[in-house]
Amino acid sequence: MADGTVSTVRKVSESTNGGNGSTSVAPSTAANRATGASEVRATEAGDQVQFTQPSNDHLVEQLFETQGPGKPNATEAAQLQKSLGVVDAGALQLLARQGTRIGVVNPGENMYQMGVLREVDLQQMQQNMPGYQARMAELDQQLDAKYKPLFADMQKRIKGLSPDDPLRVQFDLQLAQLQGDRTYELSQGLEAAGIPARPLLPPLSAKEASNSQLAQMASQVTEGPLPTAAMGDIHGANTPERLKEFEGLMQGLNGERLTAARQEGLESMRARVASAKTPEDKARFQGYLDAALKDPTQIPIDHRASNIVVPNVHYVDKDGGTSRLNLHDRVSLNNWGDGTNQAAPQVNPQTGEGSVLRGQYFEDVNRLLVRDTMVGTETPVHEVGHAIEGAVQRADAKYYADFEPRLMQAYETARNGSTVSAYAQASPREYIAEGVSHYYEDPKALKATDPALYALTQELIAKANQLGSQ
Amino acid sequence: MLLYELLETEDSLEVGECVGELYADQEGVEIVVDDPDLRERLFSLLDQPLTRRLQAPHTLGTAEVAVHPGEEGYEDALVERLRKKDFRLHLE
């Protein structure tokens, strides 16, 4: 879209609110956007007038990365302006004010150079360890008060039942579900408290758990007790130096809990030696016990029962050295071809793992990336949808606290029914991003397929417009 | 599956007349539509694999995989694709 073309009135409709000088800004409506009537609007007298407004090009352009590998070339910039020119001006202004940046990823470009990955500040983490421990103790106390009686009740029911008893199977499952609930709450609590730790593997969303290879991996990893050396290995701590550092973080985060869990682990190992049925087994189990006594990182820990947490630090090879990333960035790096944007060689058609990424919003650094081949598609608007949600949340936390439960409620309904796309059912974040994408691309279809999402999206965009126009 | 036309109202869509039938399984896609132009456009579309979008685990990343008839997600991808403005069809 070139400057000076006849633009539309759909972007914003402004009305001055009485004498207080404030302005309310409504988003465009499905009707005027979809019919094209937006370019021509009737005055009260019934005359048809054309509105010539500056296009959104300059508003879109101010979001572009201005240097480095993410900077769009002229062709990409023109395509992005076309894709994103439909977004309301107020929302774009809000993004610009919050420093949102859009980058385009070309093959071979590196995620580190894109500026979307942040190194974990190890020194700060170590300095803050006493504070983390105190907050974790509080969190544990709260969770224990809620879950310990439930666990005890379930264990009482299980006691005395044979492993083959159908009731035992049912109670075992219920106990596992309760443990999963506690893990989920722990995970949420750690995040809310700003503690850079998480359960060994965070609980998966329902969709991930039913489809993903990750779920398979999670079940393998979480099935039995694990030594901290193996936990470190999952985190990329595959050298003695990294393992030593990881072990220090484990001790710092878990303190006495780790010591107690190891003690229980040793007791289990001793019991196993004592109950071995053959001399060969006894010798083998004794060998494991001897190794564990020499090196505590080899003592298997029942991490679920002991509520051990792991540091949110993942070690990655970088330029012959070590990079430390949080889980989010580690996964992002992997998804973009370990930082080089080379698609992984094998694609799992069931889960998409190893597939080509179209785009991603990095909320920690408020940047969004779009693959070079996707700049002219709906992907930029979808990713901008994530950015708008984040921008509104940052700019008006009180409003968002009211909005989010309504979004979650609508998402739950849509997840179990139908909505505008299968992708919208992936998570509440994708649900609203799909809402924004369809709101601009095909509002009639959005309204027809999910009126609740249409209304929420319209409201969110109106809020973004208001915040952006202040 | 039956194919219905989608009619645009002022601000939404409504399901209209049935315009044909579509069968999709691992063998491929069969289309039974009277309108030769629509039939041709459908064949042309379905000649190519559809894509399915997925959330990359633990991130706000959008992944994409090709889906073929009979595969998980193909029907959803087809419903979404045919709803778009250039087809405005509803599958049921």
Image: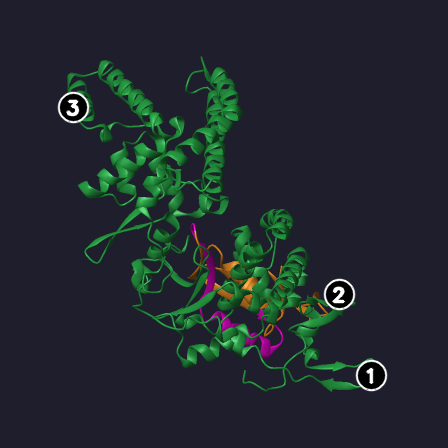
Q: Amino acid at mark 1?
A: Gly
Q: Tell me if A100 is positioned left or right of A213 in this view.
A: right
Measured Cα–Cα span from mark 2 to mark 3: 81 Å
- Foreground disc of the pair 2, 1: 2
Cβ atoms at labels 2 and 1 below 8 Å apart: no
**As drawn, A48 above or below B65:** below
Q: Secondary structure at mark 2?
A: loop
Taking the spot 54% from the left edge, 74% from the top edge, the residue there is A59
Q: Position of residue B42 (x, y in %)?
A: 54, 72
Chain letter, green in picture: A
Residue of label 2: A20
Taking depth in this image into account, of A49 and A133 the one nearest to the observer is: A133
Region rendered in magenta:
B32-58
Disc 1: which residue: A46
Ranked by sequence position, the earlier of labels 2 and 1 is 2
- For the colour orange, the matching chain is B
Q: In the image, what residue type sits under mark 2?
A: Asn
Contact (Cβ within 8 Å) of mark 2 with mark 3: no
- Between the C-alphas of marks 2 and 1, the distance is 30 Å
Residue tagged by mark 3? A287
Which quadrant of the view contains residue A236?
top left
The reply to whether label 1 and label 3 mark residues of one chain is: yes
The chain under label 1 reads: A
x, y percent for residue A79: 47, 77
In the rendered image of this protein, does residue B19 appear above or below residue A166?
Answer: below
| Callout 2: chain | A
Give the farthest residue toward the front: A20
Q: Amino acid at mark 3?
A: Gly
For the residues bearing labels 1 and 3, Cβ distance under 8 angstroms: no
Where does residue B4 sit, x and y in percent of width and height? 65, 66
